Amino acid sequence: HTFEKNPEFNTNFRMNYFKASETHKIHYEVCGNQNVEPILFVHGGPGAGFSEHDKRFFNFDKQKVIFFDQRGASKSIPFGSIIENTTQDLVNDINNLLDYLEIDNVILFGGSWGTTLGLVYAIQNPNRIKGLLLRGVFLGNKESNEHYFNGGVKKDFPEIWERFSNNVPKEYNHSFPKFYLDKMLNGSEKEKKFFAYEWAFYEISIFKKNITKKEVEKILEQIPYESLSIIESHYLSNDCFLEENYILENTDKLNHIPIKIIHGKEDAICPLKFAIELDSRLENSELFILNGGHSDSEPEIEKKIIQIINKNVW
């Protein structure tokens, strides 16, 4: 692969596809200064993909950053596919991508689902992780999952919860993610579009403090929300393909890794108590509790992310 100039950031970058399996091709980019230790950016969702907006955290004159879309997400192929798409598949993809790029170890920066995947990856591959920066901790355990899709947000967002839950028939006895996923995979074309939109509308409506309906609709015009909706409901229907409390019960594997945790005080998707619990089980962590919700564009959260990355505290 040759490096080219990216006019927007005036820096070297490489963009390509990596064959992860017979089914999946992973879209990735390597941006910035090729002579420094790399940062691996792990996006949320699952299924959201990374965006150009995510690049704002980095100074590409001083940093080298690997971005990639996880299986089925955004520009990865096939779009929205849940075939061979589990947490372990994604962990294996990270290992194989780093091997392919001839990178031994990284600082890993993940947000939301990216914290889940990042932590699972670090537990299984501690020698490849120089440091972790985690924003908006999601543990992928039963309590975290239930909070998000089983009424945990009802108190603070009654209208949003009603809109989300009213799409599921009262007599349906299984989980909401399973119902939404079934409609997105097996419904009519109209149902597929409707349920994908409604799933994403629910998430974006509660991820940032004081967000308006108009702002939500504008965001949904700009992101590949179909892959987010399908893949996220697939993972939540399957307990994120993790043994119960896998992360919390394996924190001893992370004791030598410096970990910075950033969490919004008013995070409705991932309540603060989960970040506090994770921090309490780690020996080498620092928790920053800031004003804001779940979004990385909350002013205090955004500022702290940039500050930690630029200081290169690892």
Image: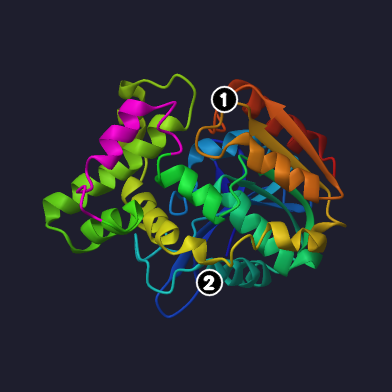
Residue designated by label 1: 298
Q: Is residue 126 above or below residue 164?
A: below
- Name the residue: 74% across, 31% down: 288
Residue 198 as seen in the image, left or right of residue 157: left
The residue closer to the viewer here, 266 or 75, is 266
In the rendered structure, which disc, 2 or 1, sits on the residue that comes first in sequence?
Answer: 2
- Relative depth, front residue between 296 and 277: 277
Identify residue for label 2: 89
Is residue 176 located in the magenta-colored stretch of the structure?
A: no
At a point 44% along the width and 69% down the height, the residue shown is 85
**Callout 1: SS:** loop
Q: Main secondary structure of the magenta part?
A: loop
The residue located at (47%, 32%) in the rendering is: 207
The residue tagged with tag 2: helix, strand or loop?
helix
Q: Classify residue 25 by image quadrant.
A: bottom left
209 in relation to 287, above or below? above
Residue 195 vertical position relative to residue 204 in the rendered view, above or below: below
Magenta stretch in the rendered image:
152-172
Q: Is residue 177 visible?
A: yes
Amino acid tagged 1: Glu
Image quadrant where residue 98 sits: bottom right
Relative placement, left or right, of 97 versus 153 is right
Crowd around label 2: few <14 · some 14–19 · many ≥20 (10 Å): some
Q: What residue do we see at 19% from left, 49% from top?
A: 169
Q: How many marks?
A: 2
Q: Please identify the quadrant where the N terminus is shown.
A: bottom right
